[in-house]
Image: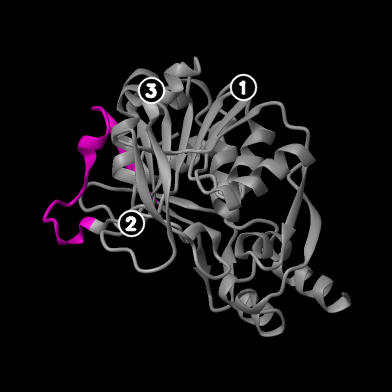
Amino acid sequence: MILRKLLRLLGHLSWLRFGVRDRVIRFFHNPDKSQSEFFSVPFFGSIYRGNFNTFIDWSVYYYGAYAYEELRLFEDFLSTFENPTVVDVGANVGHHTLFAAMKSGKVICFEPFQDVADRLEQKITDNALSNVYLFKVALGDKNELALYLKPTGQNTGTGSFSSVNPKGDTLTLPVRVGDEILAENNISSVHFIKIDTEGFEPFVLSGLRNTIERNRPLVFFEWTQEEKKNSRDNFTELFPVNYNFFNFISDTPTFVFFRKPAYKLEKLNGKWPDGNLFAVPDEFIQKLKNTNPMCSAGKQIFSALNLRS
């Protein structure tokens, strides 16, 4: 236990390059070989109950979060709204959902795979969250029952609908059109959408087209372009007009062993790279310029656009 606490202290040294911390921690406690063992730790004002045999949970214990810089971005941009509504598509075990619940008025999350949805529900119960609403369905561009390839190993986020000929353990899960299920539940205002669906993002975005056109939300989405054989540079037609697209860069190395503990946004004008992308409407940028250009969100956006705040 003493060694584990020391490794946790090391993991929280955000000024030290992640690869250095990760290599040391993995040497003593490899997440790929970790046995089932539960733990509870504080998590941004909430309690996070996890299991060391799950990579996301293992990361929370040792680093404070699975994707710390993503959460920084969430906090920076959510702070520009009053009681925002967040939609979390591909919520998994509830890591991002739990964080968003601490920073938002309402979180609408979607997770179709029962095994991980149960763990998300446990986090809702543990923290008595009344502002989180879980739907155990996937989102896509049509209502259907689709073949789902179950996640393997310790990473519960690798399950996917996107494989044409999946090899592995599969089952059939419900997929719903996002616009329809939000309308059915009288969710008419959306400020921020996060999508992480292992290559299914184009279908999710297509099914949320009306919601995005009406609400003009910020959209943070993973892009794993399975259409690599397609000659198109990007898929901007998935969004309404006057959206800006940014590449999210989570790590900025300095010297050899150190890093700047801050994310960066890089404006995209052509090909979309694989990774996490951020879509921001023109009017949100104008709002920042008029109201609070010196906030963290404003500094990130204006730096990426080479604008003065």
The secondary structure type at the circle numbered 2 is loop
Which residue matches tag 2?
224
Q: Of circles 1 and 2, which is in front? A: 2
120 horizontally vs 90: left or right: right
Q: Mark 2 packing: few (<14 Cα in 10 Å), some, or many (20+)?
A: some
Residue 132: assigned label: none
Region rendered in magenta: 227-247
> Which of the 4 image quadrants contains residue 166?
bottom left
269 horizontally vs 45: left or right: left
Q: Toward the viewer: 271 or 158?
A: 158
Q: Of circles 1 and 3, which is in front? A: 3
| Quadrant where the image shows the N terminus | bottom right
| Distance between mark 3 and mark 2 Cα atoms | 25 Å
Q: Toward the viewer: 58 or 133?
A: 133
Residue 83: assigned label: 1
Please tell me which of labels 1 and 2 falls first in the chain: 1
Q: Of circles 3 and 2, which is in front? A: 3
